[in-house]
Each structure stands twice: as structure tokens, then as C-alpha cells.
Image (cartoon, helix red, strand yellow):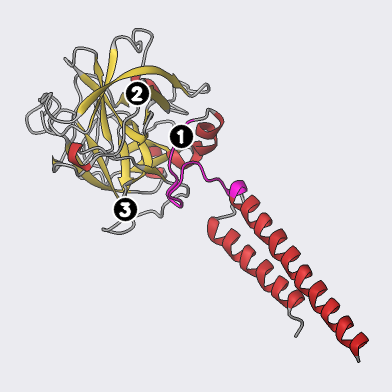
């Protein structure tokens, strides 16, 4: 059993310390990899302009094929799946399509060159364990509503089973078996892990099982794309909890769910690799628990010193008054 300290607990700890100070100062294997040209997304709909400004496409440099998706997490970084890249892919022959609703409309959104990309060092292509990678862009990409570009935040905690989340991608449509021009989206529930294990697939605590098994699904070609949610309708950014990874014996089949990389388990890995991202519990990049504790300790010490100063001043004033008497 793992004991997890949340930001709420750290805030509570700070309040307790503050109250104490006040008292002192005032005494009283047959996997379907979800990438490739034979992909599909089942049961979805067309996305709306600006709805998923964080969604990007991993494409050939000439724009002839978008084979994977990804999510823009800050001005230089994209989060995607490790299996989206093989030995033939290089920063020179790959680009990122950003802020684009219609993947073939060059006047929509923009493209960005890639400086480098790297996979998780423990990625296992046999089981798709640690199926996560990042792309560093060659130039800054700023949030821009007029250009349908936005960052997504990353989830820091595991969400409850039954939570409805949203996936997006340019995978083939189940109805036509053709790749759509317009970005597709589908809503899916987080379900029990055993429903994914039932397919006979590898599954670990580093993954999330998502899907109702009712024909609504992501599949090959949607790989690397983000699975997101919003706590409230007025929330500024989408929050990513998963990355499209692999699935069961088919996509959109009855009683078949998809397996997704659990983003919250890789925040330390991102930080260790100096990847800039936004956590869902803060509006600033990479504000970790230990950074928060440092701030609270600094405030505690400052308040303690202030209280001692007040006590000393009061003592000096009292001594002066006694001497005058």
C-alpha cells in the first residue's frame, strides 16, 4: 500500500503550523498497436474548431501521412507514445502538425520542426510497458486562441472508475474505413483493470483501462493521442490522464476495451528529463510537492522570526516602561 501526500494535505499541514505560530506569538500478445495506416476510431464525432487545441499530429515531413497523435504540454514539448517511433524515424523526416482541425488544410494551424524525440528508457515493445515518449520542438509554440493552439495540463492523481474522459485522433472511421480529414473525438469511461486483462493482454498499474465495450473506441492510428478530462466546463485547459497505447483483439468490438499509458505515473520521469509541463493542480510549470513544502517551510520560518521580533519589541517596550516608573 502506497501512502500518497496530496496538495490538500500540504495545505492542511501549513494551516496547522500557522495556527501553532499564532499561539506562540499571541499566547492566549496479440496486441493491436494503436498506430499505422489501418487505424480507426469508432463511435466518435467531428471535433469543433478550437475544441482540442492541444492535439497534434505526428506526420511525415511532407505531410503525406499522419500516423500518430500527441498532446502539446508546453511551448516546446509534445507528449506521445513510445511505439509511435521506430528506427526509420528521425527529426529530419518528421514534423508536428499543431492547432489543426483539418489535417490536410495547410492554412489551418501550423507545423513545427522537431529538434529531438526520445522514448522512456524502459519501454518494452513486447508488452508496451512504459509506452511514453516526448518530442522537443525546434521552436516555441505559444498558446493562441486565434490559431486554435493550447497546452494541456497533466493529471497528478488517479481518477475514479466510471469517470468519463475524452480521446481525439485522425484514425480511420469505423463506418467508412477511411482516414477522416477532420479530427475525431469520442467519450469513454474509465473501467476496472480486469476488463482489459480479460483480453489476455499484459496489463500493469502503469496503465489505465478505458472503454465501455459498446463499439466506441480508439484504435491504431490514434496512438500517442491524449485522453483528457475537465473538472468543470469553465476550466481553461484540458487535463491529460492517459496516452493511447494498445488494445484487445479488435477496435470497437463488443466487450473490448483499450489500454492507455497512465500519465500521472510518469511526472517524475518528465521532470528528471527536464521536460516542461503543467500539472493539473497548479498553473505554473513543474510545481512539485517538494517545491510546495519548501515554500511552506520558508513561510513558516519567516512567520516564526516575525513573531520573535514582535515578542522582543514588546519585551523592550515593557522594560523601558518599568525603568521609567
Q: Are marks 3 and 1 in contact (CB under 8 Å)?
A: no
Q: Is residue 223 left or right of residue 19?
A: left
Q: Earlier in the sequence, mark 3 or mark 1?
A: 3
Residue for badge 2: 139
Q: Residues within 10 Å of mark 1 (few under 14, many from 20)?
A: some
Q: Residue furthest bottom?
A: 325
Mark 1–mark 2 distance (CA, rounded to whole Å): 14 Å
**Residue 198 visible in the shown view:** no
Q: Residue at x 31, y 24 (%)?
A: 33
State the count of labels.
3
Q: Residue at x 24, y 25 (%)?
A: 221
In the image, is residue 179 above or below residue 4? Answer: above
Quarter residue 257 falls in: top left
Residue for badge 3: 230
What's the magenta region? Answer: 275-291
- Asked which secondary structure carries label 1, the reply is loop
| Residue 107 pos. (x, y %) | 11, 27
Q: Is residue 44 left or right of residue 82?
A: left
In the image, is residue 299 above or below residue 207? Answer: below
Is 289 inside the magenta-drawn segment?
Answer: yes
Mark 3–mark 1 distance (CA, rounded to whole Å): 21 Å
| Residue 15 pos. (x, y %) | 62, 68
In the image, is residue 159 above or below residue 224? Answer: below
Q: Earlier in the sequence, mark 1 or mark 2?
A: 2
Q: Residues within 10 Å of mark 2 (few under 14, many from 20)?
A: few
Amino acid at each position: 500500500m502506497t501512502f500518497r501526500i496530496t496538495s490538500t494535505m500540504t495545505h492542511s499541514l501549513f494551516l496547522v503550523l500557522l495556527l501553532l505560530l499564532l499561539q506562540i506569538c499571541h499566547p492566549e500478445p496479440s496486441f493491436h498497436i494503436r498506430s499505422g495506416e489501418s487505424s480507426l476510431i469508432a463511435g466518435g464525432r467531428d471535433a469543433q474548431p478550437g475544441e482540442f487545441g492541444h492535439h497534434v499530429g505526428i506526420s511525415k515531413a511532407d505531410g503525406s501521412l499522419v500516423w500518430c497523435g500527441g498532446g502539446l504540454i508546453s511551448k516546446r514539448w509534445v507528449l506521445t507514445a513510445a511505439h509511435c517511433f521506430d528506427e526509420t524515424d528521425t527529426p529530419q523526416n518528421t514534423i508536428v502538425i499543431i492547432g489543426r482541425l483539418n489535417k490536410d488544410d495547410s492554412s489551418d494551424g501550423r507545423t513545427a520542426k522537431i529538434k529531438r524525440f526520445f522514448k522512456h528508457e524502459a519501454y518494452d515493445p513486447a508488452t508496451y510497458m512504459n509506452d511514453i515518449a516526448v518530442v522537443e520542438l525546434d521552436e516555441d509554440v505559444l498558446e493562441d486562441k486565434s490559431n486554435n493552439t493550447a497546452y494541456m495540463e497533466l493529471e497528478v492523481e488517479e481518477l475514479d472508475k466510471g469517470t468519463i474522459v475524452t480521446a481525439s485522433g485522425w484514425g480511420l472511421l469505423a463506418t467508412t474505413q477511411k482516414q477522416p480529414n477532420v479530427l475525431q473525438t469520442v467519450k469513454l469511461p474509465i473501467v476496472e483493470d480486469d476488463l482489459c486483462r480479460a483480453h489476455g493482454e499484459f496489463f500493469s498499474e502503469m496503465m489505465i483501462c478505458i472503454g465501455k465495450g459498446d463499439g466506441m473506441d480508439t484504435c491504431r492510428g490514434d496512438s500517442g493521442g491524449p485522453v483528457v478530462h475537465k473538472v468543470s466546463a469553465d476550466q481553461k485547459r484540458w487535463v491529460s490522464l492517459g496516452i493511447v497505447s494498445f488494445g484487445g483483439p479488435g477496435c470497437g468490438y463488443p466487450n473490448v476495451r483499450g489500454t492507455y499509458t497512465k500519465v500521472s505515473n510518469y511526472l517524475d520521469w518528465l521532470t528528471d528529463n527536464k521536460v516542461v509541463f503543467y500539472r493539473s493542480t497548479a498553473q505554473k510549470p513543474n510545481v512539485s510537492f517538494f517545491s510546495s513544502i519548501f515554500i511552506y517551510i520558508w513561510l513558516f520560518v519567516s512567520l516564526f522570526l516575525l513573531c520573535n521580533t514582535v515578542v522582543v519589541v514588546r519585551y523592550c517596550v515593557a522594560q523601558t516602561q518599568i525603568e521609567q516608573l
